Image: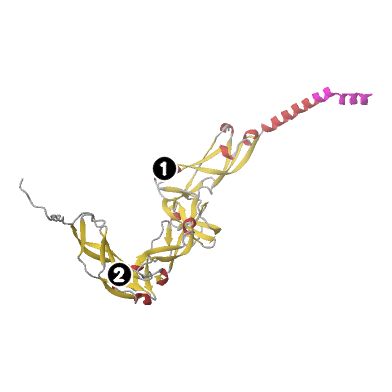
Amino acid sequence: MARKLIEKIASSRTVLIIISCLASIILWLYVESVENIDADRTISGIPLNYIGEADILADRQLIVMNKDAQTVDLTIYGKRRDVYAINREDINVSVDLTDIRSTGTVDRVYDVSFGGSVNSQDIYILDKSPAYVTVEIDRMSSRQIEVRSESNITVAENYMAEPLVFDPAQITVSGPEELISRIDHAHVVVERENLSRTVTSSLGYTLVDEEGAEVDMTNLSVSTERVDVTIPIVMYKDVVLTAELIEGGGATTADAVVKIEPASITLSGDAELLSGLNQISLTSVDLASFDESMSGTYSIPIPNGLTNLSGTTEASVNVSLKNLAIKRIVASNIEFINVSEGYEATKVTQYLDVRVRGPQAIVDLINAYNIRIVGDLSQYGQAAGRYAVEAKVYIDGYSDAGVVGEYTVVVSLEEKSEEEPPEEEGEEETEP
């Protein structure tokens, strides 16, 4: 019967709830008694806070060395619940450096305080390790450090990389004088492949000494932690130098032999500018302006936005004519056109020595009566006087030949005199 009673009680839900509540109360009473006992605990790796470092030492051009390398361990005592509620961030370990005025190594005691919601009156410090800290003070220095690169860059065919551009080109580094003096430059590693356009990347860097060894940046402050590196990529191309030939004087481009030195130059620049450029004209050469050959030196005009990689700024041009003969003919057939009404033109120049050029067989057939010299007086209007007029020389009947050189003739332009009409026969004067 007792067994049935026990089974009945165990199956009752109300009884189970009452038992659970009693168990919870007993557990809470146990925890409270345990948590309220005294306990100690060691908290390690607590960082130091240097009082006066940011203002007073900075004004004196002093700096704390290896400040992040040193920490302290504290053993605290109090109620178990309070002790284990404290975090490392709740503890402030401070070292007063406001009286430091020179470089060197000093031993300093430190103060411990608790922040946050910690009730410090119930917390006791049983042990400090170490009992004091060693502080190393050095002279503060600052200087501009040049940015340099180690480049591993490849470019596409017919392209080239120009010198890298760094922004900033120099970095301001501040820190211990001894450490700053060791720095040679800021080292950036640039790696890109098969470039055909200009690119810019933001890269980190390391500070290195003259031997290329890395300098520890722990105690240093820098003006920027990254550098923008621009890799200018330009196209390069060989461009031919030419001279524009103007046919005349019985000579065509087929009769001319052109020699230019140098024959071409190498240019670099933006692909859009350079891709359509195949030649550069140095000058225009009128074949009627010389007898057999001409030479000259001319500046090479470089289009805006392009760079002359060859470095040559001038080129020589020589033009010579082949298979042509020259004959000098004294001609007197001089005439004037566009003479203003009421004026007459009288030639002062009676003869011109004209140079005729063409194939030998044609030149042999040309004589003075084939030469016609024409002066145009249209620009002189009704201004009487004597003028030197530019004249055009024509060779009538021989289109394969031409005239070499420029010619002028002197003309006298005068107003025509009015003539009195003749008297009619048989008319006699009669008195009125």
Q: Position of residue 179 (x, y in %)?
A: 46, 55
Tag 2 residue: 371
Query: Is residue 288 among what the camera can see?
Result: yes
Q: Quadrant of residue 260?
A: bottom left
Say whether residue 80 is magenta: no
Say whether residue 4 is magenta: yes
Per the rendered image, the range of residues in magenta is 1-18
Residue drawn where x is 57% and y is 39% of the image: 89
Residue drawn where x is 56% and y is 38% of the image: 91
Which residue occupies the foreground of this view, 75 or 214?
A: 214
Which residue occupies the foreground of this view, 228 or 302?
A: 302
Task: Say if 247 sits above or below 187 in the image.
Answer: below
Dot 2 lies on which element?
strand
Q: Quadrant of residue 371?
A: bottom left
Tag 1 residue: 56
- Main secondary-structure element of the magenta-colored stretch: helix
Q: Position of residue 373 (x, y in %)?
A: 28, 66
Q: Quadrant of the N terminus?
A: top right
